Image (cartoon, rainbow, N blue to C red):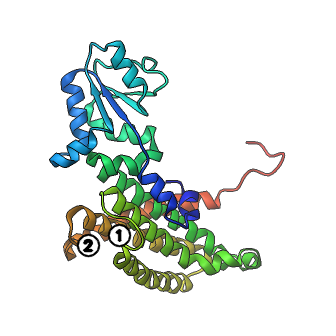
Amino acid sequence: MRTLDVLREITTFGLQREANQAFLLGIAGDPDEADRARQAVLGPDPTPQQVGDAAQFLLVLYPPFTESDRYRLARCDLVVSVKGGPGITECRPADVVLISRPQDVISAVLDARPWLAVALARRLPGFRDAVADRLIHAVSRANAEFTVVAGIPTALPWLAPYVPAIAVADGLVLTKNQGFLLLRLAAVYGKHYTLSSRAKELLGVAGSGLGVRSLVRRAAGMLPGGVGLGVKATVAYTATYVLGRIAQYHFKHGREPDQEEVRSLRAEAADRARTVVREILARVRRRPPANGSEA
């Protein structure tokens, strides 16, 4: 997800459309390679029901390809071609991605069709962990970026009259984004994802959001403006990342992580936050060259 998409989401209608998109994924090539790719998208231990449910979303074909096979592949939203599979122009109008290793199928499909990520994960369990990872990182980064933008009036007081709404609403936006992340992760792992079905978890997000906002403001207030922006962004990224990972664990395993696992998640979040916040602040500090100056 792009940062702008995360920030402007205010209802669950978009998520419902996203999770329920119809698609047909084709896999074509040598039987052994194609079957390994199929296993990758179904996951290591799919239930018989999951295998049956996936049949309407997954088409696997082996050479030699008949005219009927090519017609069926052409109707796919995307065709993954493994060894012995069709070339990039052989399944028109369907797009074809070529992979040399069956285990690369997940990343190749998500890179080619990012807008199908939640629907793919909901129907094909092998996509779930990868999609969850991408969502958690994207929303954590979006919260960090928004926190920097919302904190600019504090760092540069003369800007405050121009962006008062952003400065006031920063905490509400962070909590809203975390709530939608939780709902999206529920959808990814095949759970109910309506507001009513996840009310208990969402109340927990709202409660934790109050603490995060207080921590962000206290920490940033003790430091000079530019440094405070980095602290706010780091806290926003880390809190969102940990919350996302805990929600992922809950939906995947049906229980909460233990204290040792949470400590590990926090360390992982802090490590990622350092890199991400450095990138964000470097981009904010960058200025275009003055008119007439040399590049």
Residue at 19 percent of width and 48 percent of height: 49
Judged from this view, the residue extending furthest toward the right is 292
Q: How many C-alpha atoms fall within 10 Å of the one at disc 1: few (<14), some, or many (≥20)? A: many
* Placement of 257 over or under 14, stated as above or below: below
Where residue 24 is drawn, which disc sits there?
none
Q: Nearer the viewer, residue 2 or 200?
A: 200
Q: Position of residue 129 (x, y in %)?
A: 29, 53
Residue at 30 percent of width and 57 percent of height: 190
Q: Are marks 2 and 1 in contact (CB under 8 Å)?
A: yes
Dividing the picture into quadrants, the one containing residue 182 is: bottom left
Residue at 71 percent of width and 74 percent of height: 163
Q: Nearer the viewer, residue 223 or 116?
A: 116
Residue at 54 percent of width and 81 percent of height: 220
Q: Position of residue 270 (x, y in %)?
A: 37, 68
Q: Where does the C terminus fall, quadrant-wise?
A: top right
* Of the image marks 2 and 1, the number of the one nearer the N terminus: 1
Q: Position of residue 201 (x, y in %)?
A: 35, 76
Q: Position of residue 286 (x, y in %)?
A: 65, 56
Residues at marks 2 and 1, CA–CA distance in whole angstroms: 8 Å
Q: Is residue 251 left or right of residue 237?
A: left
Q: For numbered disc 1, what is the local secondary structure?
A: helix
Q: For numbered disc 2, what is the local secondary structure?
A: helix
Q: Nearer the viewer, residue 269 or 62?
A: 62
Q: Is residue 218 left or right of residue 272?
A: right
What's the amino acid at mark 2? Answer: Val
Dividing the picture into quadrants, the one containing residue 159 is: bottom right
Residue 45 in sight from this viewpoint: no
What's the amino acid at mark 1? Answer: Val
Q: Is residue 177 left or right of residue 151?
A: left
Q: How many C-alpha atoms fall within 10 Å of the one at disc 2: few (<14), some, or many (≥20)? A: some
On the image, numbered disc 2 is attached to which residue?
262
On the image, numbered disc 1 is attached to which residue?
242
